[in-house]
Image (cartoon, coloured by chain):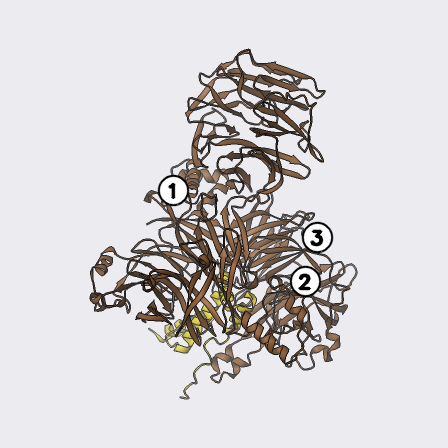
């Protein structure tokens, strides 16, 4: 692969990653992967009315409250990221 | 295995509702999204009743819905955001009574995904643009306009994306005719993702961002973005913009930001106003809990506007804004009323409030007043320093109100909703019923109910009065053809006729011209103003001036059957001859000179109504004793010529295009009469009951309908362009007729023995009659007892304080001499709900219900913060097979992650024939028992991820065997022989076996796919049908060879030492069928819905769906595959889609039928037959 091609392929990939949030890549850390999974799951719960209702009934909350708290949890569903090694 | 899916009851949940002038007429309509269905409702402004105009399946999941009107337009469109990756604009066409898709723009992948828009929709209040957004990042703006022909046009999308931002809400900002603006409530997580201390996430503030659509440059810019309260969750549009004519401002513009405990008025570059959300002061309530707004509606009146906001407890607040031009002077809030917690609120201009409640029935309220001059305390931002924004990070002092019964609103109508169904059973326990009933546990919290659903139409009786004798027939008749209401009721007895006049009272009249000394065979209002009576010896034609023209039967003969319409009379004589009369233009009844000899005694005859603008109906159907139905032409050229014969035993019939033939055997045949050649084709049969069928033509909503009387009464009518055939839930009728009077304009009159009954059918179009019994908490499960008809229901509610704990707490408060608002404790729980308690608090009870009487027999409240999760009736061999009720409970349960201080197995003895329970003992266990089942004289329990066998001991349940290798938590159990099928919360269905000699519980097969099981049932020894949390139903089967092999292994040593496959059990089950229903499946049963019918799989869904999966007898029935959501659909035909065939335009129908190589009639017949034979619906 010529360096030029590699260069364009990479930019394309980067572009695609920026475009499709949640897509994985080779260097994805476990934490990032898990966070993506959780965010996807939480958004699908919010997106399916019956799932939101189900959780709301189990929890004894209004569906509006359940939806709000699930959306809130999307900010950091798996806790803070692990500390970066300073290298 | 091939299955056919048929929905018996569509979902009734209402995740969203909108109001608008969708038909373009002056009247407002409501569109409700039922998740997978759209329903258009029209409220009757006079009566305050809602009627359904149409309901359409969308075969997708609707996530957002909004009404939209172009500038200067008079008609609203509905914009739908769904999981299709498309924006869809629907127009309701009143002509065809259907939703027409005007635009469908694709922007992304299908599915409810994180970054594919569809979750939120906001429109520009002036009708120029719409924003559709995803939960994260994506926002698209479409410009809507009209072309020269005044059609709605849509632009290409303009992007307003913002990476790494989670969206909570969007709303259109009212800026008048300046560039359209949208407000969004966002959180940016870029920093939170990088910061390992977690500080950034904790401080991730919410931003209120304005996106401006620059119409000149055709792009969207982020105009303004400011942090707002971090707990904000909801935005409400505030009116704004200037009127061109007066230059007066409609309002200050901007938005209301609803956040926990507060409401903030916000607009770019203007001071903020903040007010607290008043809350209830309940002695048992959790005072540390924040209160959020979950639904809101803004209403504009002439020169003014107000908001109704609803809190998560159901309280409505009225918000008003005091403003001078664009400057806000004060933001005010006061308590308005309390209604069920809504997913959407709609205010109609005619003074109604529609509450699309999130659970339970939907309600329509009428405004009595607007809460303007009551003594409810109002909180204004003027009374707080800096309009409440002196210290934005600090809460304002709490504001309180006292909830009270409705004052400003009055309930006008209610739409029954099954949402949510938490458990169901199909049983036939009601007396005098030949079809099973469906019992469902519905609702949530204090609005929960146990419902009995019976197939049939509800009947409302208005009059029931005893008669001197037993009549054999009844008719009603108008005196003149153009009258609205009936004038006479004619009752025929064995030896006479009684005429009653309908006025303020119903009383006997003499001088009507009717012969009273003989029984009557037929009565008809004929011509413009004449009446006709057919009796065994003649026909009396009573003219308007009471002159009577009588035609007498030749001596020695009598009339045995007669049929009439407005212009024609046919009578059959005892000599098996037909005599035909026709009204001429002068109003004279003329006999046709030839008599037709039938050769067999006539039992029944029928002619249809004269078609509009015609002289006669050309066909007569005659049923004879020799088991034939003959269609006879009444055309002048070929009068009384037999056209077609058909074998059948008879009773009476009706033809328009259909000829219905009732048989002595209780079977109804429906055939189609070909209008051109008079052939009878396309015969469909249906079993109605055990008595000979009698058919009567009646009017239902001024449409012809047929009452079929047998041991049950059936009504065949058309509603919303579809033919319905439904039994009436009413006593057996001997005869019936239409009845129309002022007090009962759309009624029916019937006789049962010697009782005359006048009744009406209030809810046409429904299939199920519902009776509800209120419960205290959210019901979880229920069970029947083999020896009695009681139901044992377990109810538990999270975040609700139990009876016992509540009493203790109140006593404590009283002993501490704390002031307690006693009035609040007196409030009806059904309207106001249980006070909210912290997480981990449970209210729970066991209830014994008598379903036949529809009442609660006994309630046993659970103490110690225990909540019931599972229930079983088990005979214990150790106690001589005496039946015990075992209830699985857990103390201080927390849901996520699931934990409890202790689980318990409570064992009860049945006393008083099952009407009461006596606690035998309580056994402590280590986790929440979610499933219990009687098993070989012992009990098998799913406790967390352990499957255990317990036997009863003196003081405790004794653990006998255990297997702890299940995936996450056991939720369902079913058994046959020594096989136990275990449904796991996340890991699908396991097949386990109990080997008694070695006392081993072993898993020998599982599913290759992970499934989040919610319910399961064994279809046969090797097959299991189960439903999962994502709305799928599937059928798994174990290889028969494996099944035999496991059964042949006496000790289970073989299974024990077999090598696992794919990190699981040694054998895998095979997927036989798979289908996505679109509603979360809560129960599944293998039942037969029709007496003698085949067994089907009946399932219920959380949102109120009830459906059946019908096994298709031959593979030839299997057509197309649809509905694969999470897994491609397999071996299930979507009956709902097939049934839409009946609604298609004829051209389309014949095209489809042509491709199937069938006639349209054949296709329709096939679909109907599938429905009828499987479900009886």
Label 2 sits on a secondary structure element that is loop
Tell which subunit mark 2 falls on. Answer: B
In space, the residues marked 3 and 1 are separated at their CA atoms by 51 Å
Q: How crowded is mark 3: few (under 14 residues within 10 Å), some or many (20 or more)?
A: some
Which residue does the numbered mark 3 point to in the structure image? B350
- Looking at the image, tell me whether mark 3 or mark 1 is earlier in sequence order: 3
Q: Marks 3 and 1: which is nearer the front?
A: 1
Q: Residue furthest bottom?
A: A86
Whether the residues at callouts 3 and 1 have beta carbons within 8 Å, the answer is no
Q: Residues within 10 Å of mark 2 (few under 14, many from 20)?
A: few
Label 1 sits on a secondary structure element that is loop
In space, the residues marked 1 and 2 are separated at their CA atoms by 51 Å
Q: Nearer the viewer, residue B861 or B1059?
A: B861
Q: Nearer the viewer, residue B430 or A54?
A: B430
- Label count reads 3
Which residue does the numbered mark 2 point to in the structure image? B405
- Disc marking residue B1092: 1
User: In the shown orientation, is residue B260 left or right of residue B884?
Assistant: right
Residue at 71 percent of width and 68 percent of height: B334
Where does residue B138 sit, x and y in percent of width and height? 52, 67
Where does residue B958 sit, x and y in percent of width and height? 34, 71
Whether the residues at callouts 1 and 2 have beta carbons within 8 Å, the answer is no
Chain letter, colour brown: B
Chain A palette colour = yellow
């Amino acid at each position: 692969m010529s360096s030029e091609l590699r260069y364009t392929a990479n930019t394309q990939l980067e572009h695609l990653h920026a475009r499709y949030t949640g897509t994985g890549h080779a260097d994805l850390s476990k934490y990032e992967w898990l966070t993506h999974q959780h965010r996807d799951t939480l958004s699908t719960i919010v997106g399916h009315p019956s799932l939101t209702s189900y959780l709301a009934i189990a929890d004894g909350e209004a569906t509006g409250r359940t939806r709000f708290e699930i959306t809130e949890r999307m900010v950091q569903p798996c806790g803070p990221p692990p500390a970066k090694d300073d290298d | 295995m091939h299955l056919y899916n048929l929905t018996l009851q569509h979902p009734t949940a209402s995740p969203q509702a909108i109001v608008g002038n969708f038909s373009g007429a002056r009247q407002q309509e409501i569109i409700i999204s039922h998740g997978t269905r759209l329903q258009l409702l029209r409220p009757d402004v006079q009566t305050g009743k809602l009627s359904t105009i149409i309901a359409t399946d969308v075969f997708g999941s609707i996530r957002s819905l909004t009404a939209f009107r172009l500038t200067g337009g008079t008609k609203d469109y509905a914009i739908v955001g769904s999981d299709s990756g498309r924006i869809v604009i629907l127009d309701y066409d009143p002509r065809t009574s259907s939703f027409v898709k005007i635009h469908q723009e694709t922007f992304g992948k299908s599915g409810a995904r994180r970054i594919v828009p569809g979750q939120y929709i906001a429109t520009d209040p002036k009708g120029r643009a719409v924003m559709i957004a995803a939960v994260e990042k994506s926002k698209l703006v479409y410009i809507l306009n009209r072309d020269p022909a005044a059609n709605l046009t849509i632009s290409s999308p303009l992007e307003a994306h913002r990476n790494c931002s989670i969206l909570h809400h969007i709303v259109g900002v009212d800026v008048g005719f300046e560039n359209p603006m949208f407000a969004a409530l966002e959180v940016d997580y870029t920093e939170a993702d990088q910061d390992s201390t977690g500080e950034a996430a904790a401080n991730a503030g919410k931003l209120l961002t304005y996106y401006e659509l620059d119409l000149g440059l055709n792009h969207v810019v982020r105009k303004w973005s400011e942090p707002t309260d971090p707990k904000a969750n909801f935005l409400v549009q505030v009116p704004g913009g200037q009127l061109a004519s007066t230059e007066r401002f409609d309002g200050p513009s901007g938005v209301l930001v609803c956040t926990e405990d507060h409401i903030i008025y916000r607009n770019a570059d203007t001071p903020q106003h903040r007010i607290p959300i008043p809350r209830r002061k309940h002695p048992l309530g959790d005072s540390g809990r924040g209160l959020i707004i979950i639904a809101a509606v803004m209403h504009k009146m002439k020169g003014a506007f107000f908001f109704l906001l609803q809190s998560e407890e159901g309280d409505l607040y009225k918000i008003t804004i005091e403003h001078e031009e664009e400057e806000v002077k004060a933001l005010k809030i006061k308590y308005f009323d309390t209604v069920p917690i809504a997913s959407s609120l709609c205010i109609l201009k005619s003074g109604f409030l529609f509450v699309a409640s999130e659970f339970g029935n939907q309600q329509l309220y009428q405004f009595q007043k607007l809460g303007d001059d009551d003594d409810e305390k109002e909180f204004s931002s003027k009374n707080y320093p800096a309009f409440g924004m002196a210290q934005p990070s600090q809460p304002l002092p709490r504001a309180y109100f006292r909830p009270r019964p409705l004052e400003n609103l009055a309930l006008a109508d209610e739409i029954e909703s099954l949402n949510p169904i938490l458990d169901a059973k199909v049983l036939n326990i009601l007396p005098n019923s030949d079809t099973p009933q469906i019992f469902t546990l519905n609702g949530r919290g204090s609005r929960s109910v146990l419902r009995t659903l019976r197939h049939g139409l509800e009947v409302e009786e208005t009059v029931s009065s005893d008669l001197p004798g037993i009549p054999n027939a009844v008719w009603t008749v108008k005196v003149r053809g153009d009258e609205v209401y009936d004038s006479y009721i004619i009752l025929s007895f064995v030896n006479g006729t009684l005429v009653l006049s309908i006025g303020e009272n119903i009383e006997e009249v003499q001088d009507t011209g009717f012969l009273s000394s003989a029984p009557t065979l037929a009565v008809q209002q004929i011509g413009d103003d004449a009446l006709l009576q057919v009796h065994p010896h003649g026909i009396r034609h009573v003219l308007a001036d009471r002159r009577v023209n009588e035609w007498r039967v030749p001596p020695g003969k009598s009339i045995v059957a007669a049929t009439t319409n407005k212009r024609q009379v046919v009578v059959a004589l005892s000599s098996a001859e037909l005599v035909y009369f026709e009204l001429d233009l002068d109003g004279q009844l003329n006999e046709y000179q030839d008599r037709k000899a039938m050769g067999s005694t006539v039992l029944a005859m029928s002619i249809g109504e004269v078609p509009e603008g015609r002289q006669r109906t050309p066909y007569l159907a005659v049923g004879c004793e020799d088991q034939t139905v003959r269609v006879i032409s009444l055309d002048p050229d070929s009068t009384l010529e037999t056209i077609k014969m058909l074998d059948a035993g008879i009773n009476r019939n009706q033809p328009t295009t259909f000829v219905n033939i009732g048989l002595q055997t209780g079977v109804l045949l429906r055939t189609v009469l070909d209008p051109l050649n008079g052939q009878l084709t396309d015969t469909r049969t249906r079993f109605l009951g055990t008595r000979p069928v009698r058919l009567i033509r009646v009017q239902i909503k001024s449409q012809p309908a047929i009452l079929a009387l047998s041991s049950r009464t059936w009504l065949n009518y058309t509603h919303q362009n579809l033919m319905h055939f439904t039994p009436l839930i009413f006593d057996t009728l001997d005869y019936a007729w239409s009845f129309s009077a002022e007090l009962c304009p759309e009624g029916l009159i019937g006789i049962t023995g010697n009782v005359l009954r006048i009744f009406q059918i209030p809810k046409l179009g429904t299939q199920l009659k519902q009776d509800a019994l209120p419960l205290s908490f959210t019901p979880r499960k229920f069970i029947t007892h083999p020896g009695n008809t009681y139901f044992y229901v377990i109810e538990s509610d999270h975040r609700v304080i139990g009876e016992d704990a509540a009493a203790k707490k109140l006593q404590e408060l009283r002993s501490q001499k704390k002031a307690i608002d006693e009035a609040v404790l007196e409030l009806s729980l059904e309207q106001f709900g249980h006070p909210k308690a912290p997480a981990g608090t449970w209210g729970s009870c066991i209830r014994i219900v008598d379903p036949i009487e529809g009442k609660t027999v006994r309630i046993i409240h659970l103490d110690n913060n225990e909540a019931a999760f599972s229930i079983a009736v088990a005979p214990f061999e150790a106690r001589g097979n005496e039946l015990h009720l075992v209830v699985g409970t857990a103390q201080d349960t927390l849901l996520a992650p699931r934990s409890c201080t202790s689980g318990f197995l409570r064992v009860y003895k049945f006393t008083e024939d099952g009407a009461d329970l006596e606690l035998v003992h309580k056994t402590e266990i280590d986790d929440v028992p979610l499933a219990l089942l009687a098993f070989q004289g012992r009990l098998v329990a799913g406790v967390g991820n352990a499957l255990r066998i317990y036997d009863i001991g003196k003081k405790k349940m004794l653990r006998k065997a255990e297997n702890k290798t299940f995936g996450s938590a056991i939720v369902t159990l079913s058994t046959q022989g020594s096989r136990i099928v275990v449904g796991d919360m996340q890991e699908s269905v396991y097949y386990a076996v109990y080997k008694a000699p070695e006392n081993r519980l072993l898993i020998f097969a599982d599913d290759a796919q992970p499934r989040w099981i919610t319910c399961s049932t064994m279809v046969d020894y090797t097959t299991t049908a189960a439903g999962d949390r994502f709305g799928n139903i599937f059928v798994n089967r174990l290889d028969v060879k494996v099944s035999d092999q496991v059964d042949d292994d006496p000790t289970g040593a073989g299974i024990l030492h077999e090598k696992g496959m794919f990190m699981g059990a040694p054998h895998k089950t095979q997927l036989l069928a798979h289908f996505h229903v679109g509603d979360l499946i809560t129960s599944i049963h293998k039942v037969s819905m029709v007496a003698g019918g085949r067994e089907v799989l009946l399932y219920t869904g959380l949102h109120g769906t009830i459906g059946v999966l019908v096994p298709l007898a031959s593979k030839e029935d299997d057509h197309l595959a649809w509905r694969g959501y999470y897994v491609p659909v397999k071996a299930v035909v979507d009956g709902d889609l097939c049934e839409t065939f009946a609604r298609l335009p004829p051209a389309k129908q014949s095209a489809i039928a042509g491709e199937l190589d069938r006639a349209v009639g054949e296709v329709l017949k096939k679909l109907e037959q599938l429905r009828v034979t499987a479900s009886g619906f």
